[in-house]
Image: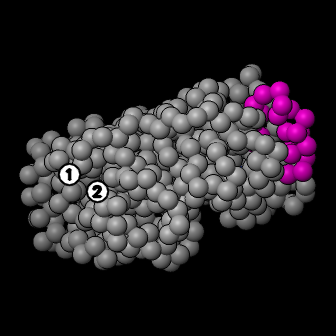
Amino acid sequence: MTLALGCIADDYTGASDLANTLTRCGLRTVQTIGVPSDDLALPEVDAVVVSLKSRSIEAGLAVSRSRAAEKWLRDRGADHVLFKICSTFDSTDAGNIGPVMDALRADSGDAIVLVTPAFPETGRTVYQGNLFVGSVPLNESPLKDHPLNPMHDSNLVRVLARQSRTKIGMVELAVLTRGPDAVRARLAELGGKGFGAVIVDAVFDRDLETIGAVALDHRLSVGASGIGLGLARALVASGRVKSNAPNAVAGAPVGGPAACLAGSCSQATLQQIASAEAVMPVLRLDPAQVVAGKDEVRRALAWAGERLARGPILIASSSTPDQVAALQSRHGRDATGHAIEQAMADIAEGLVQSGVRRLVVAGGETSGAVVDRLRIPGFLVGEEIAAGVPVLRAVGAAGGDMLLALKSGNFGGTEFFSDALKLMR
Ligand SMILES: Nc1ncnc2c1ncn2[C@@H]1O[C@H](COP(=O)(O)OP(=O)(O)O)[C@@H](O)[C@H]1O
Ligand SMILES: O=C(O)[C@@H](O)C(=O)COP(=O)(O)O
């Protein structure tokens, strides 16, 4: 297998978002969980997205895992590697975008790296180096209340400069609109002045196409699904990849009981849970009891056991920003997040033991904990449920055929859970 594009995603929902975009642009793509073992049979593909759970771990560990993934991808012929980060630049001053970028840049030998989280289809745009979520700057968006990485600065040049050892510059929209050669000239100028990375503005998909064409001159880029779209379209336009991906894998129906788990506390997910209450039984866990080590998992599985045969169910730990802050002040941010993630993984494991084969999970870290617990080594990309969220078909899973949807907390319309289940047959 010779890869046209190698990708390292810092969480599992982000990886499926990117795999979805690449597939839709015509690249045959597979998502793996971690660096695949030698015995995982992968189909012939143009791109592999290696999913890591490295967004909110210690920076040194994120660097070593990302470098191992990079080596695996380069060994399989990937000339270009995309480090997939969140379209809302989820990170803290301790990392992990800057440290991973610095290490991959050193490995790749690139003088300068293009960085953009823009993903216009989901309302993420970058102008003058500032990230907008819909119509508001990042620091005024719901991301200011994220349980693990609250975002308080929309100026990404500043945000990345606090995390990276290199000088961070900017390529503004006015340069981008003059086309690839104008961008190349600006990069040469900035590279000459010692800048090692640039935040690139992008508002429309055509800006991402320009970025993709230029990024292919380099060995590394950093960004969200939007830059994935730019790279994929550039690979097809340059003839390096024949656009031969089927629109999505279909496969035999899986059937059986279906369940949804929500660990995201994003505004979008809170609304989706409220809407789901009209169409399926919803159990709201008591997060304080979970963190205190009380047996919420057993309660949840008993509740589910009484209902699963009659139709889909939803179990949620999600609460409002005030409630999240109150719990974190008692137990600490990381311990709270970890305890709830592990409880969700316990519940997922119990549900699968009870026969669930169709599982929707809301939340990136939550999805990571669940997929790790279910020991699923990889996914093929199926139909798109909402922008950035495909149906996934597990490959190589010990438990046999299974469909999942891993939803970024912020993605999807109000009816997301029922929309997903309609496509997961
Ligand atoms: N009620 C709650 N209080 C505090 N933290 C919570 C609660 N419910 C879930 N969490 C934690 O919040 C984090 C949500 O992150 P994640 O799953 O990545 O969602 P998103 O996709 O919205 O970023 C996880 O660590 C999860 O365990
Ligand atoms: O780029 C994005 O916004 C998503 O692909 C993503 O990374 C999701 O992260 P979570 O919101 O933590 O699920």
**Residue 291, labelled with which disc?**
none
The rendered magenta stretch, by its main secondary structure, is classed as helix
Indicate the secondary structure of the residue bearing disc 1.
loop
Image coords of residue 272 (percent x, y): 65, 31
Is 122 on the left or on the right of 361, as rendered? left
What residue did someone put label 1 on?
Answer: 240
When asked about the image quadrant of residue 336, the answer is bottom right
Image coords of residue 41 (percent x, y): 50, 59
Image coords of residue 124 (percent x, y): 40, 41
Marks 2,1: beta carbons within 8 A: yes
- Specify the farthest residue to the top: 278
**Residue 4, labelled with which disc?**
2
Q: Which numbered disc, 2 or 1, marks the residue that appears first in the sequence?
A: 2
Q: Which residues are magenta?
A: 297-316
Whether label 2 lies within 8 Å of ligand 2 gets the answer: no
The question of residue 247 being in magenta is answered with no
Disc 2 marks a residue whose amino acid type is Ala
Is 213 on the left or on the right of 229, as rendered? left
Indicate the secondary structure of the residue bearing disc 2.
loop
Q: Residues within 10 Å of mark 2 (few under 14, many from 20)?
A: many
Q: Which of 192/323 is in front?
A: 192
Q: At x 55% / y 43%, what residue is drawn? A: 392
Q: At x 85% / y 51%, what residue is drawn? A: 297
Rounded to the nearest whole Å, what is the CA distance between mark 2 and mark 1? 7 Å
Q: Which of 281/274 is in front?
A: 281
Is 90 on the left or on the right of 199, as rendered? right
